[in-house]
Image (cartoon, helix red, strand yellow):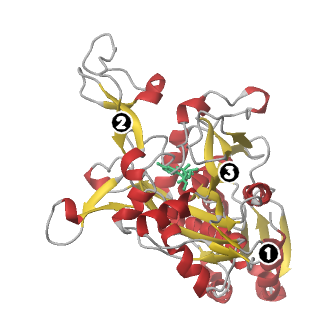
Amino acid sequence: MNSRDSESNAMHSGGGPQAPAAPLRMEALVSLCARRGILHPSGEIYGGLNGFWDYGPLGVELKNELKALWWRRVVRERDDVEGMDGAIITHPRTWQASGHVEHFSDPMVDCRACQRRFRADQLADAPDCEAEASGQHDFTEPRDFNLMLETNIGASRDAASLAYLRAETCGSIFPAFKRVRDAARQRVPFGIAQIGKAFRNEINPRNFTFRSREFEQAELEFFCRPGETGKWFEHWLDQRLRFHRELGFGEQVLRTRAHGPDELAHYCGRAMDIEFRFPFGWQEIEGIHDRGSYDLSQHAEFSGKDLSEFDEQEKQRFVPEVVETSVGVDRTLLALLCNGYAEEALPDGERRTLLRLAPLVAPIKLAVLPLSKKLAEPARRLAADLRRSFQVFYDDSGNIGRRYRRQDEVGTPWCATWDFDSQQDGAVTLRDRDSMKQERVAASRVGGWLRERLEAAP
Ligand code: GAP
């Protein structure tokens, strides 16, 4: 268990000379996301469920692209990392061993007047009391509120059937350490990576998807020899910063923040947050943690199984230490949306909204647009051909300017227009989302053209 990110600490630390000229209004982004099928409140027709979100047709593509990029960089392109996909509900002893059952809590207060609950460390941001004319709350003393979401397994509902939805995906990695190591014939140093859902009964879900009750994490637990943890910490911090830069996060929106001694969990030697500058302040999107040998030692003790390794050089056993990288998929996706969102005036006096998403993760790579419905047939053929390798969208409704705007708004990096000349020269006009520059390319070359650009990205 790690010390949890502290929103209130970071809320006020950004700004200054790095602030962007026109701050994004979150309402505009929230509205775009719902309107264009990126994401919306879960159970919306019933009024929504606080802290739960559904991703729509474009949102699921964007999320899948983001996860696939992480998987490629962290797992596929390395021979010292193995993947796994563990159960969301793992053995309840897991969470006793990790300390979550006892300690995974936030300080909470109740207001005696309006009956609402707040996180005691975020009171500066609490809305006014609805029951008191003065707006002042009448708070109880803070007490700990455990964030684990509980469920029961089987037909009975008693202490023996109690189980937990995992609060962090690594909960299923540590108990599987020995099995994965032996099955994959690995020896430390090596890592186990996983992407999956995590659940926390947050007291105040807020800032769109930033703090949700159900979310996805992409985590790597990298096991190494004691004495080499520092080296691997630096290595993974560097790798993870590269990843965020690949997403297009420049230094004006990306920074690292080391945890002070008072923020560190007792077993954690060192922790570094990677923070993004959201419209609501600098906030953690990823944590890199030196967890020491805490996890394997705890699980060895609670399970009675030996999770140590034999050091051939030293001729002795040791318990591997862990460097963890833990990134929120939904938070990173929110950062992508905030970073990409822009409203621009065009030379003809019109305005456009656009999402400058890195092409590697854009939910649609190319839109194929016939200039007229009369050209639908060859344009559809081109789209069908390209669809075998790329996410391609076909659209023949409305004027071409409006169709470009619709693609700009969802971050499609390129549009291919099939016009009347295409019938003669077999070429299409390719238009770039950001510069709006156009170039003529043979229709048969569009696939190669796209591949070159995606490989050259960012
Ligand atoms: N295994 C370590 C761990 O879970 P954490 O700092 O609690 O560490 C890691 O979480 C990442 O998970 C965070 O940096 C954040 O991106 C994401 N995350 C945590 N709580 C979240 C929440 N309530 N909603 C959305 N994302 C969350």
Work out whether 119 lies above or below 330.
Answer: above
Q: Of callouts 1 and 3, which one flags the residue occurring earlier in the amino acid sequence?
A: 1
Say whether residue 307 is visible.
yes
Q: Which residue is mark 3?
A: 340
**Residue 95: x percent and y percent?**
40, 58
Q: Of callouts 2 and 1, which one flags the residue occurring earlier in the amino acid sequence?
A: 2
Dot 2 crowding, Cα within 10 Å, few <14, some 14–19, many 20+: some
Residue 438 as seen in the image, left or right of residue 50: right
Work out whether 368 lies above or below 354.
Answer: below
* Amino acid type of the residue tagged 2 in the rendering: Asp
Query: Is the CB of mark 1 within 8 Å of ligand 1?
Result: no
* Amino acid type of the residue tagged 3 in the rendering: Gly
Dot 1 crowding, Cα within 10 Å, few <14, some 14–19, many 20+: few
Looking at the picture, tell me which residue is in the foreground, 316 or 218: 316
Work out whether 243 lies above or below 126.
Answer: below
Looking at the picture, tell me which residue is in the foreground, 125 or 48: 125
Dot 3 crowding, Cα within 10 Å, few <14, some 14–19, many 20+: some
Residue drawn at the location 61% of the way across and 49% of the way down: 285
Q: Which residue is mark 1?
A: 313
Give the mark toward the camera: 1 or 3: 1
Looking at the picture, tell me which residue is in the foreground, 438 or 230: 230
Q: Which residue is mark 2?
A: 144
